[in-house]
Amino acid sequence: MTAHTTTLKIDDKVVDLPVREGTIGPAVVDIGKLYAQTGMFTYDPGFTSTAACESKITYIDGDEGVLLYRGYPIEQLAEHGDFLETCYLLLYGELPTPTQKADFDYRVTRHTMVHEQMMRFFQGFRRDAHPMAVMVASVGAMSAFYHDSTDISDPYQRMVASMRMIAKMPTLAAMAFKYSIGQPFVYPKNDLDYTSNFLRMCFAVPCEEYKVNPVLSRALDRIFILHADHEQNASTSTVRLAGSSGANPFACIAAGIACLWGPAHGGANEAALQMLQEIGHVENIPKYIAKAKDKNDPFRLMGFGHRVYKNYDPRAKIMQKTCHEVLGELGIKDDPLLDVAVELERIALSDPYFVEKKLYPNIDFYSGITLKAMGFPTDMFTVLFALARTVGWIGQWKEMIEDPSQRIGRPRQIYTGAPRRDYVAMAQRR
Ligand code: CMC
């Protein structure tokens, strides 16, 4: 809603700009008509001061370390709810009643199998392909397998595509894992809950019974809740931008997965564990702290810092607790990586460099140790992030498609290349 206007003076020109207020968080200056009124663009690389959309889904207060899904604090959802309840909340805006929850669980469960032909598609990949490469390709390929849910102007097809992706992502992720280790694919089992089913598809083999450990299943389910959405981050903005052109939902989510893969974003959990392994021992920490502080060294402490959180990432606190629970359940008493992580965190939280720059541990700092203890190899970490974030991407994509004011996203630029010049024939070039 527009609360008031503010004025902007550029040289001798004064323009009135509407100021819009959200329910919480900073107000925004609406510059939509700035170009028409002044002939000027704004310049904000990295979007540090730019709101690209209006959204009712997720709210972050980075200074206070607050994360809300549809108004509910992440701590409460992680403590009391399950992942599919969070999915329902993100998609529909309210917590489900018992009947709604049962119906939603049923609908997701009934979509977990993938088209049998997809098995053949998987077999075209090299065994050593990174599972994120396989995920980008296989989710994009869903638009070739599920043509009947690619018409974005049809609300029914949008709903079917959404359910298909939430339901099939664990199946595809488990297939990517099984393929990489040379084991047969395990079909989903619909009497298991979402996360137990995923664990079974990852770790069961046809020659023996697999019993899901409820502590690990609950811990992974909580990890999924923590990763389910995070406002307008790089991959979500990618999904929105791809979707703004009218691209089909499978293609949009594949674009989001590709963006998530980067080490500054979802790939940080893999990078954080590799860093802990490289540090190896508590006595090596000072050397790495010095490297992280050295302006001439590109090394960064992975799992530290965040564009929005300038306080402890609320997800990191829950992740740290979950990490201890998982290691306790598995009887891992002396994990040298955990020792390194705890000491690194202690030093970084008291070192003036990190304190002044407000660099706190983020969600990725403890997730790697936890997932490794559960039996996932490092290159699967970002895949698990993608699995959980799918619902956030879909919720944000749906919100955008259903917004009547939605237009194609088209940023502008400040051009600093050569001005107009005439073509020079090859023979005359020196
Ligand atoms: N280690 C050492 N120094 C750091 C780090 C770090 N991890 N992160 C930021 N800095 C310094 C940086 O050098 C800069 O210093 P100066 O002001 O002297 O130039 C200052 O802090 C601000 O950094 P920035 O790069 O301008 O901040 P940003 O908001 O653009 O980047 C970030 C945020 C997450 C990309 C960055 O903190 C980073 O690279 N962290 C490590 C990767 C990581 O853990 N990413 C996971 C993010 S959480 C999961 C997700 O949402 O995907």
Image: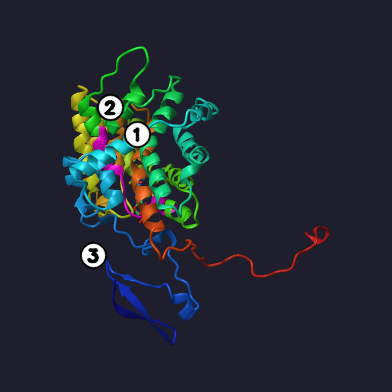
Height in image: 274 above or below 332?
below
Q: What residue did someone put label 3 on? A: 23
For the point 37% across and 35% down, the residue is 111
Q: Which class describes the residues within 10 Å of circle 1: few (<14), some (14-19), or many (20+)? A: some
Residue type at mark 1 is Arg
Residue 191 circle label = 2
Left/right placement of residue 395 relative to residue 314 reads right
Please give the range of residues in magenta.
220-238
Along the polypeptide, which appears first: circle 2 or circle 3?
3
Seen from the viewer's position, the closer of residues 116 and 233 is 116
Q: Quadrant of the N terminus?
A: bottom left
Expressed as whole percent of the image width and height from the top left, the position of residue 379 reads 41, 32
Asked whether, in this view, residue 231 is left or right of residue 114, the answer is left
Residue 344 lies, with reference to residue 421, above or below; the image says above
- Furthest toward the bottom, the residue is 12
Is 124 a magenta residue? no
Within the magenta stretch, is there residue 231? yes
Question: Circle 1 sits on which residue?
Answer: 110
Query: Of marks 3 and 1, which one's residue comes earlier in the chain?
Result: 3
Viewer-proximal residue among 219 and 109:
109
Q: Is residue 308 above or below residue 414?
A: above
| Residue 126 in picture, x, y percent from top left | 53, 27
Q: CA distance from mark 2 to mark 3?
A: 41 Å
Is the C terminus in the top left, top right, bottom left or bottom right quadrant? bottom right
Assign a secondary structure to mark 2: loop
Residue visible at 37% across and 15% down? 206
> Which residue type carries mark 2?
Asp
- Asked where in the image residue 176 lies, by quadrant, the reply is top left
Q: Is residue 361 visible?
A: no
